Image (cartoon, rainbow, N blue to C red):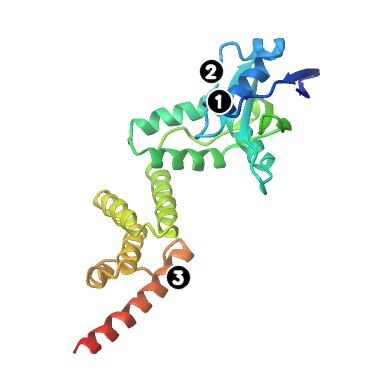
Amino acid sequence: MLRQCYVIGLAIILVIVRPVAANDANSAQAVIRTFINDNAALATLFADSVIEPAGHDKAYVFAEKDATRYAVIAVPVKSNIDMTQIAEPLCRSRLMTPEAIEVKKNLYATTDDNRLIKTVLNIWQNAGQVEQVKMNTRILSDAGMVLSICKAASDDIRVSSTSIDKTLLHQAEMIIARQLYDHAAYRDVMTRMNDYIQRNNSPEAKTFLGLALLKQAEYEQAFMLDEQFDSSGLSDPWLEAEYQSVFAEAVDIYFTSSLANN
């Protein structure tokens, strides 16, 4: 058994963390449950809280009491990666849980696109600030988990508006397009950007669509699309440079092939 000390306020809490079976359906949730149940103070603090999954292999729990917010998060240990660097920012972000719930509610009223919702939440959380955070992190080797517990005064939580505007949605869409493009999922880029362009006359979306068409060697469609927008002066320098490079290469390939066929 692993004996861990955590500090909440001025009290030092001694916790016995029992190993969790590796085949547990969600070992991260089980680790947090054991951690809480083995200490009376934590059990009282989180009595009305639900341990929530965070992705497929992480979990967290949140509570707010006496104008102070608390969070615990468990993430799996991974070789060659310092998972404390993952756990601590995640724990900090979970201190914004009440506002995040409101953002989620507004997002689900706007879209049912889970990938878009996740991306918007990440952007929103990264923009938030949590000051004067107290953090304690331990590696639970027997359980194969990193556990972080953190706290901050409720007044030290600084977040942007919980409303969803077009600028935030656009930023998220372009992040998703870049992710898909970087993974050579060009058909997915085409599908997503075609749909987005129907609702928004975005030169960035048209640029990503053009890139996907060029990468799929659908040159004539790409050349027709190129006449509909100006790729120079985009707000994303990488996107502008990538498009100009890929377009120039495509022109060479297209006309070289045309000359060879004639």
| Foreground pick, 194 / 22 | 22
Asked if the residue at tag 2 contacts the one at tag 3, i.e. Cβ–Cβ closer than 8 Å, the answer is no
Q: Where residue 130 sits in the image (x, y, percent)?
A: 64, 34
Q: CA distance from mark 2 to mark 1?
A: 18 Å
| Foreground pick, 165 / 169 | 169
Query: Residue 50, labelled with which disc?
Result: 2
Q: Is residue 155 visible?
A: yes
Q: CA distance from mark 3 to mark 2?
A: 47 Å
State which quarter of the image contains the N terminus. top right
Q: Residues within 10 Å of mark 3 (few under 14, many from 20)?
A: some
Q: Earlier in the sequence, mark 1 or mark 3?
A: 1
Report which quarter residue 235 is drawn in. Answer: bottom left
Q: Is residue 16 left or right of residue 83?
A: right
Residue, disc 1: 24
Q: Earlier in the sequence, mark 2 or mark 1?
A: 1
Q: Residues within 10 Å of mark 2 (few under 14, many from 20)?
A: few
Residue, disc 3: 241
Amino acid on which disc 1 is placed: Asp
State which quarter of the image contains the C terminus. bottom left
Q: CA distance from mark 1 to mark 3?
A: 48 Å
Query: Regarding mark 1 in the picture, which secondary structure is present there?
Result: loop
Q: Where residue 218 sits in the image (x, y, percent)?
A: 26, 69
Q: Where residue 225 sits in the image (x, y, percent)?
A: 25, 67
Amino acid on which disc 2 is placed: Val
Q: Is residue 126 left or right of residue 135?
A: left
Q: Nearer the viewer, mark 3 or mark 2?
A: 2
Report which quarter residue 204 is drawn in. Answer: bottom left
Query: Residue 196, labelled with which disc?
Result: none
Query: Regarding mark 2 in the picture, which secondary structure is present there?
Result: loop
Q: Is residue 250 left or right of residue 42?
A: left
